[in-house]
Image (tube, rainbow, N blue to C red):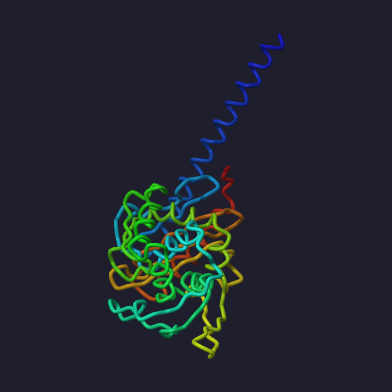
């Protein structure tokens, strides 16, 4: 009798959970249909629901393309995984000058900052000389650093990704939107990367000999300063070959999502796409009871 009741109970539970799962899939299908109509303009895009572990929207997710300064998320993970001293002072040298894209920098040759400060500038303000110095001062130098970047990518299952430098200035840094979901998810597990990528601004005082001066930086993603957003990780990128890129981990209507936007054609397109995604979730997704 008791055994029979237990079997009946388990059968009922299985039916209920199966029904919930089916409803969950149906609701997510509705969500995908709705978001497809909101007009994502970036050439490649993904909205990934971390709670349900499902992709809500996908556009050209397997297309391999340059990722510009999104590369710096991998740079940061390699630095933090290596155990190098973050409070060690490192100096900007002529080797850190960008002679490929001729990008500008506030950091003068000879400027000295702690490695942690260089890391924050690379992540928050996409400071290329800082990212170059991080790789150059890595044990074994830049070549060893790039090897570690690609080893980390393979360990994360980023099968369609390749890294050739720490800054993202080289178009040979390539990935797919699907792979970048894995990158953002992994990077979000590092408290320092979360803090550094979402800081609105940062003031540093580089030294050169006995002289010091103040430099003020702001986050390259204006959304981190918006009260309408709850962002857990952010990184922008741009070179001509990659277009304008933006990846974020954010919480929208109490759901953690990863947003990947690549090759946006205008200066504000990636921001517009992110806001369209947020408004869609606030207006429609809040009514969908999606079970994790």
- Residue at image point 59% right, 51% down: 287
- For the N terminus, the image quarter is top right
Q: In which quarter of the image is residue 191?
A: bottom right
Locate residue 209, reporting x and y percent. 50, 88
Which residue extends farthest top? 1
When the figure is inspected, residue 26 is found, relative to residue 78, above or below; the finding is above
Locate residue 259, reporting x and y percent. 46, 59
- For the C terminus, the image quarter is top right
Which of 231 and 112 lies nearest the eye of the viewer? Answer: 112
Give the tally of numbered discs. 0
Using residue 282 as the reference point, say whether residue 244 is left or right of it: left
When the figure is inspected, residue 197 is found, relative to residue 105, above or below; the finding is above
Which of 15 and 192 lies nearest the eye of the viewer? Answer: 192
Using residue 179 as the reference point, say whether residue 21 is left or right of it: right
Using residue 7 as the reference point, say whether residue 168 is left or right of it: left
Which residue extends farthest right? 2
Which of 239 and 117 lies nearest the eye of the viewer? Answer: 117
Locate residue 22, reporting x and y percent. 51, 35
- Residue at image point 29% right, 57% down: 64
Which of 181 and 42 lies nearest the eye of the viewer? Answer: 181
Q: In which quarter of the image is residue 224?
A: bottom right
- Residue at image point 61% right, 71% down: 227
Locate residue 38, reporting x and y percent. 43, 61
């Amino acid at each position: 009798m008791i055994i029979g009741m237990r079997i009946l109970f388990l059968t009922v539970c299985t039916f209920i959970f199966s029904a919930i799962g089916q409803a969950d899939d149906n609701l997510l299908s509705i969500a995908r249909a709705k978001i497809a109509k909101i007009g994502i303009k970036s050439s490649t895009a993904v909205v990934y629901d971390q709670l349900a572990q499902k992709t809500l929207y996908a556009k050209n997710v397997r297309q391999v393309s340059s990722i510009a300064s999104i590369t710096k998320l991998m740079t940061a993970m390699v630095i933090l995984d290596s155990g190098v001293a973050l409070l060690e002072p490192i100096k900007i040298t002529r080797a850190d000058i960008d002679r490929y894209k001729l990008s500008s920098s506030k950091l003068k040759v000879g400027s000295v900052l702690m490695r942690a400060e260089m890391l924050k500038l690379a992540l928050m303000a996409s400071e290329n000389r800082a990212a170059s110095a991080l790789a150059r001062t890595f044990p074994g130098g830049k070549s060893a650093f790039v090897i570690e970047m690609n080893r980390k990518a393979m360990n994360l299952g980023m099968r369609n990704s390749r890294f050739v430098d720490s800054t993202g200035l080289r178009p040979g840094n390539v990935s797919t939107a699907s792979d970048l979901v894995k990158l953002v998810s992994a990077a979000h597990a590092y408290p320092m990367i979360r803090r550094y990528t979402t800081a609105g601004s940062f003031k540093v005082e580089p030294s050169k000999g006995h002289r010091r001066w103040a430099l003020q930086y702001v986050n390259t993603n204006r959304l981190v300063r918006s009260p309408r957003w709850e962002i857990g990780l952010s990184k922008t990128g741009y070179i001509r070959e990659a277009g304008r890129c933006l990846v974020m981990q954010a919480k929208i209507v109490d759901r953690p999502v990863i947003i990947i936007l690549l090759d946006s054609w205008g200066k504000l397109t990636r921001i517009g796409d992110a806001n369209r995604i947020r408004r869609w979730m606030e207006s429609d997704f809040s009514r969908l009871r999606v079970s994790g």
